[in-house]
């Protein structure tokens, strides 16, 4: 029987990182028409930022050539995510959006012992408390098959070393989403910080620990800037 009450495990979250590129044709429309499209799109996003789903808006304008905006959406069902996205597609601006990168996953508590769980260690909890930082870096992450053939105790040792190295950068908050079985990657990593230089320094530091030998994939790396829904849409044109 399912556990209930205090013994019940935390309800898992469905997490989506959706990157969009606005087609150039939209920017050639009359200003007044674009204004109507933007207002409509904003209303839909605001309606879905509710109890059933959290919508965090990010701008990528000027940061990459293949994306203009990103939505970090957290809900508790695929049906909710699908309904919200369907409403966006039905807007006028939705007809000019191309999905350039798309990541889907679920929260899950790590199987490894990671020590005391501070806020900076939310990567290893079964829920995500997202937002509040200026910058966000997203990347898919998969490990080699050989990694999973190693004894658990050996993997725990390597993970412990990795965690200790990451904790040298307390201004970076790491969130881990489990995509295995749902999407093309095993995990999606979301790094939040107000200090982008810490992301660079941490990446350089972590490539020197043993865990880096077992990484199969950790690209593309997508950087975004936190903003309001209104500002995110204004920046696209």
Image (cartoon, rainbow, N blue to C red):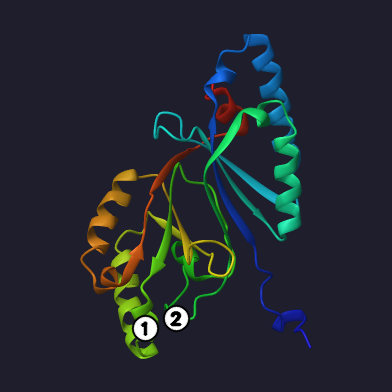
Quarter of the image with the N terminus in it: bottom right
Question: Residue 105: in sight, yes or no?
Answer: yes
Task: Give the residue number, with chain letter if any, for mark 1.
Answer: 156
Left or right side of 33 for 202: left
List x then y, in percent, for residue 183.
55, 61
Q: Which mark is residue 112?
A: 2
Q: Is residue 82 above or below residue 126?
A: above
Which residue does the image show at 69% across and 29% down from the upper left? 41
- Between disc 1 and disc 2, whose residue precedes? 2
As helix, strand or loop, the secondary structure at mark 1 comes to helix
Q: Is residue 57 above or below residue 80?
A: above
Which residue does the image show at 52% across and 21% down from the upper left? 24
List x then y, in percent, for residue 20.
54, 37
Q: How many residues crowd around disc 2 within 10 Å: few (fewer than 14), some, or many (20 or more)?
A: some
List x then y, in percent, for residue 6.
72, 81
Check contact, mark 1 vs mark 2: CB within 8 A. Answer: yes
Quadrant in the picture for residue 206: bottom left
Quarter of the image with the C terminus in it: top right
Quadrant in the picture for residue 74: bottom right
């Amino acid at each position: 029987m399912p556990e209930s009450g205090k013994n019940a495990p935390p309800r898992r979250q469905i997490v989506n990182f959706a990157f969009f590129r606005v087609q150039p044709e939209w920017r050639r429309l009359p200003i007044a028409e674009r204004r109507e499209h933007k207002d409509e799109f904003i209303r839909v996003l605001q309606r879905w930022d509710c109890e059933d789903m959290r919508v965090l808006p990010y701008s990528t304008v000027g940061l990459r050539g293949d994306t203009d905006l990103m939505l970090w959406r957290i809900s508790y069902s695929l049906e909710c995510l699908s309904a919200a996205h369907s409403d966006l597609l039905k807007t006028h601006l939705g007809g000019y959006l191309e999905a350039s990168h798309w990541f889907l996953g679920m929260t899950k508590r790590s199987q490894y012992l990671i020590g005391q769980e501070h806020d900076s260690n939310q990567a290893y909890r079964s829920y995500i408390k997202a937002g509040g930082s200026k910058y966000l870096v997203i990347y898919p992450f998969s490990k080699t098959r050989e990694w999973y053939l190693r004894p658990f105790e050996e993997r725990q040792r390597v993970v412990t070393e990795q965690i200790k190295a990451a904790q040298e950068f307390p201004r970076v908050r790491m969130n881990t989403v489990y995509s295995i079985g749902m999407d093309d990657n095993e995990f999606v990593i979301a790094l939040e910080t107000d200090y982008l230089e810490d992301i660079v320094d941490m990446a350089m530091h972590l490539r020197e620990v043993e865990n880096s030998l077992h990484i199969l994939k950790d690209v593309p790396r997508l950087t975004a800037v936190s903003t309001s829904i209104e500002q995110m849409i204004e920046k696209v044109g």
